[in-house]
């Protein structure tokens, strides 16, 4: 067995540099930016009003001043003349500030009678003007690599970027194995169960931007597994579920070798999730996950998610951990790193009372994994522990 950190590093070493493609901005959400985006303009491109009100000269911006309104400036339709002392322009939020003005007085601080206004006794602080380039200037960069969230998409649009270079989304094939499995919606036989891990992992992969697909369930035979491996041709990553242990019916490692995979490691010092393996053939990565539902999804969090991110050009690094106080006592740990299902409460993080690796209902109620180091002596309520949010 190898430590979790070493297994993750060895997985990252299998990742090739991802390809790059240019996509329209409307298709870029959730993708990973492959090169810095550089703005060819500034935002706003002119001094703009931050409020609805009246634009006045700096000299006239005094309580009680009476002014004549000589025009209007609206968003998309500016006032084209210059404003001199004794005059004002009605202005709206986002509109260009007229030449000669130095302040926008809020409309609620003004009394108007026809074309005349009188400024109120309190004009507030600031000039209510957004200078040109307040948001960003010409030449500003949105640095890569980064996942393009809605905020980045909006920023790219404001930078007048119509197309963006992004890393190619990895193609992933998910292969569940086992004679005992049938897909959801089918009636299982007396000795069968519903396949669940593959659907959870598919959701995990797609949430991370992968182009993931489910392969037909492979039975516990070398022939069936060979067919599954053949169907995975063309994928950048093949994720197998189950059959990774050392029982008489655990054939995935043998079938992978027969299919041309060179195995890099097999078994990791963690629980749940010990029977985990990885290998590669002709540039295709194999990640073999255990079959127990919680083991499979915990390994998906610890290994699959960081791997998919690295395959999209994001930094090759473990999932972020944070410190949090325990809300209940934590018992001693054995020789493997332990990932305990837990809930975050007002009193701290609370370990779930049942930790069996087959209990999906417990995992569904959890929003964190407590990471307990090998041979940890345990901890009392109030002590700090490391967690992964899930």
Image (cartoon, rainbow, N blue to C red):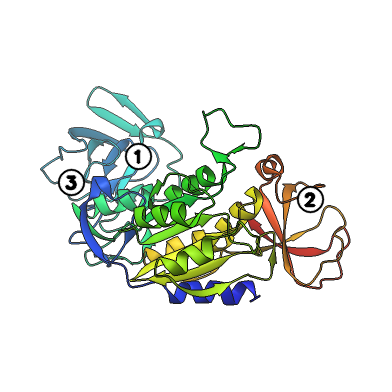
Question: Under tag 2, what secondary structure?
Answer: strand
Question: Under tag 1, what secondary structure?
Answer: loop
Q: Is residue 314 visible from the viewing direction of this image?
A: no
**Which residue corresponds to mark 1?**
51
Q: Give the quadrant of residue 376.
A: bottom right
Q: CA distance from mark 3 to mark 1?
A: 21 Å
Q: Which quarter shows the N terminus?
A: bottom right
Q: Residues within 10 Å of mark 2 (few under 14, many from 20)?
A: many
Q: Where in the figure is residue 124, as x and y percent of width and height?
A: 45, 44
Q: Is residue 330 visible from the viewing direction of this image?
A: yes
Residue at coordinates 52% horizontally, 33% vertically from top-left? 184
Q: Where in the figure is residue 46, as x and y percent of width and height?
A: 21, 52
Q: Disc 2 vs disc 1: which is toward the camera? A: 2
**Which residue corresponds to mark 2?**
350
Question: Under tag 3, what secondary structure?
Answer: loop
| 93 relative position to 345: left or right | left
Q: How many marks?
A: 3
Q: Residues within 10 Å of mark 1 (few under 14, many from 20)?
A: some
Q: CA distance from mark 2 to mark 1?
A: 48 Å
**Which residue corresponds to mark 3?**
84
């Amino acid at each position: 067995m190898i430590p979790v950190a070493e297994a993750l590093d060895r997985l990252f070493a299998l990742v090739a540099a991802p390809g790059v493609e240019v996509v329209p901005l409307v298709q870029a959400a959730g993708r990973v930016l492959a090169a810095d985006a550089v703005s060819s303009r500034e935002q706003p491109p002119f001094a703009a009003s931050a409020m609805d009100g009246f634009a006045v000269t700096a000299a006239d911006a005094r309580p009680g001043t009476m002014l004549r309104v000589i025009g209007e400036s609206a968003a998309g339709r500016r006032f084209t003349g210059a404003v001199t002392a004794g005059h004002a322009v009605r202005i709206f939020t986002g509109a260009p500030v007229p030449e000669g003005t130095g302040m926008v007085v809020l409309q609620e601080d003004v009394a108007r009678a026809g074309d005349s206004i009188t400024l109120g006794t309190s004009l507030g602080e600031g000039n209510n003007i957004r200078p040109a380039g307040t948001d960003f200037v010409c030449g500003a960069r949105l640095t890569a690599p980064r996942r393009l969230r809605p905020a980045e998409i909006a920023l790219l649009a404001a930078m007048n970027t119509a197309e963006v270079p992004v890393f190619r989304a990895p193609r992933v094939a998910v292969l569940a194995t086992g004679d005992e499995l049938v897909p959801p919606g089918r009636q299982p036989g007396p000795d069968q169960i519903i396949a669940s891990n593959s659907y959870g992992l598919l959701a995990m992969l797609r949430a991370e931007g992968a182009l993931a697909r489910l392969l037909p369930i492979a039975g516990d035979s070398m022939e069936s597994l060979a067919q599954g491996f053949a169907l995975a041709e063309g994928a950048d990553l093949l994720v197998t579920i189950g059959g990774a242990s050392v029982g008489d019916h655990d054939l995935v490692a043998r079938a992978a070798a027969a299919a041309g995979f060179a195995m890099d490691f097999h078994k990791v010092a963690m629980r749940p999730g010990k029977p985990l393996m990885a290998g590669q053939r002709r540039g295709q990565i194999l990640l073999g996950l255990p079959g127990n539902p919680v083991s499979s999804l915990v390994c998906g969090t610890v290994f699959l998610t960081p791997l998919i991110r690295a395959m999209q050009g994001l930094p090759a690094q473990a999932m972020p951990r944070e410190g949090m106080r325990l809300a209940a006592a934590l018992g001693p740990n054995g020789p493997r790193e332990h990932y305990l299902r837990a809930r975050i409460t007002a009193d701290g993080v609370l370990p779930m009372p049942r930790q069996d690796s087959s209990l999906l209902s417990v995992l569904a109620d959890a929003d964190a994994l407590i990471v307990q180091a090998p041979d940890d002596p345990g901890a009392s309520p109030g002590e700090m522990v490391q967690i992964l949010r899930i």
